[in-house]
Amino acid sequence: MDESIDDSHRRGLLSHGLSVIPANALGLDPMNRIYPFEEVSRFDLSTDVLVAGFGGAGASAALEARRAGAEVVVLERASDGGGSTMMSACEMYLGGSGGTRLQRDLGFSDSTRNFFDYLMACFGHHADEARVRVFAEGAAEHFDWAEGLGVKYKRGFFPGRDVVALTGDSLQYTGNEKAYPFSERCTPVPRGHLPADSGHKGGVTLMTTLMKRVEEAGADIRCDARMVGLIQDADGRVHGGVVRIGEDELFIEALRGVVLCMGGFIMNEAMTRRHIPHVESFCTRHGNPYDLGDGILMGVAAGGHAIHMGEAFISIAHYPPESLTFGIFVNDKGQRFVNEDAYLARIGHYASVQPGGRIFMFIDDAHFARPRYVLNTEIVGTGDTVTEVEREAGLPDGALQSTVALYNEHAAHGSDPLFHKAPQWLTPLDQPPYALVSYELDKIVPAAFTLGGLDTLPTGEVVTPDQKAIPGLYAAGRTAAGIPRTSKGYASGMSVADATFFGRLAGKSAANRGRETA
């Protein structure tokens, strides 16, 4: 195969660069272009499947495409793979089919229906029922796939309330399973599967192993290679992509399909200002430097549909220590707005819609502690009475007093009629001195990442607004709108599970498409 570059045909293609949508419709970077297939005189490289991105989704897609017998080229803009998955603790949120092998070994059972119902409850009208069903039915096998790669999972269950188990154990609760309203709809089951002895470094454990398996499988991996456009014919079929390596642009033919796994858009300030301004104004951007939305923009330029672009994960990790769960969150009117035993992303969602993002925790001396992960909290009111705290903090007269009095009255009887905090976290806050701790969003600058992306079939095909698949184009990971679609239903491990699971399906689909249409 000839990998030289014909400068004259490259300049000609640049002059014919097209975009299906106006350049400013999604903050379109001029790099993300559609190149007309009819104008391509020859390709510099040909493969069966072209995978753009070498994070969790891209690596999974590449591995499955190779296992299906396809030739695979992987492009990675960074100097090495890993993506945002490598930056994560790498829990995978899995269950169903009676339980994963890890769940069953530890004595837990999780039916597919229970798992499906929980995910549907998490995301409601945002959920893609077909996608959720495929995931619920296949998630237990996906754990076997991950363990089969050589990733080790310790047969240990961590029962505490922490963001990540730091005990070396591999199973824990990582979402809202035991919190209202989910606990009333579904049987709580721990579903966070964490690589053994990894703590917050599970992403390194999984991605190091996964990338090694891709390399061993024989994929052609090219780093420092930025995908800058798709090659598409007049009938809409995608035939390949254009990649920039140094000063050169290579035209790569994909005989069976292109899989976009290029991350979300949290690092693209133009896109975050347009789509998540309510989050962009106060958040810490959490992702790798190339979460710039390139894959989403390319997919839209090819006729795809971007959905849920206004949704983002927001983290307010007020626990651990778990004793802080006994406290109550209030807004600047002194009113509660959430059950405090909820997962950190659900708290983040409800905090983000409070006036000015001004939220506070009221707590007594018996339960006061400093949170491990939220570093910029500030005590804005103290006193031996609630009245003193209220006045020092400048809250409306009587507001906090009324809230605390009502809460304490019912907590003494193990109930929370307003927000239904679980009884294990209910006790009157009546041990002075008291404190009001500021969690104001513009001060704690919580971590955030995007959840919107391309609309796809469960098997990975990118679809148009009228749900027609674009031939030869697939997407997975945060380039696609996956299982997790709102912060208020999120659980740790949903993104990694979604990226790797649906990355696998996209890789298989792309690899098999050529055989079906040959």
Image: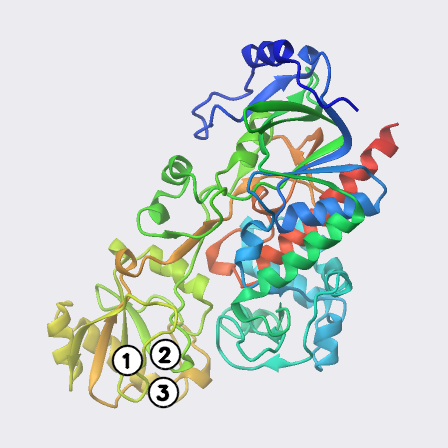
Image height of 456 relative to 398, above or below: above
Element marked by disc 1: strand
- Amino acid type of the residue tagged 2 in the rendering: Leu
State the residue position of label 2: 324
Closer to the eye: label 3 or 1? 1
Q: Quadrant of residue 415?
A: bottom left
Q: CA distance from mark 2 to mark 3?
A: 12 Å
- Amino acid type of the residue tagged 1 in the rendering: Ile
Which residue is drawn at the image coordinates 71% and 54% (left, top)?
212
Residue 294 located left or right of residue 354: right
Labels 3 and 1: the sequence-earlier one: 1
Residue 451 visible in rendering = yes
Labels 2 and 3: the sequence-earlier one: 2
Q: CA distance from mark 2 to mark 1?
A: 8 Å
Which residue is drawn at the image coordinates 70% and 81% (left, top)?
106
Residue 235 located left or right of residue 290: right
Q: Quadrant of the C terminus?
A: top right
Image height of 8 relative to 185, above or below: above
Nearer to the camera, 59 or 494: 59
Image height of 295 relative to 498, above or below: above
Within-10-Å neighbours for mark 1: few <14, some 14–19, many 20+:
many
Label placed on residue 363? 1
Within-10-Å neighbours for mark 3: few <14, some 14–19, many 20+:
some
- Mark 2 and mark 1 residues within 8 Å of each other at the beta carbon: yes
Which residue is drawn at the image coordinates 39% and 64% (left, top)?
316
State the residue position of label 3: 427
- Amino acid type of the residue tagged 3 in the rendering: Thr
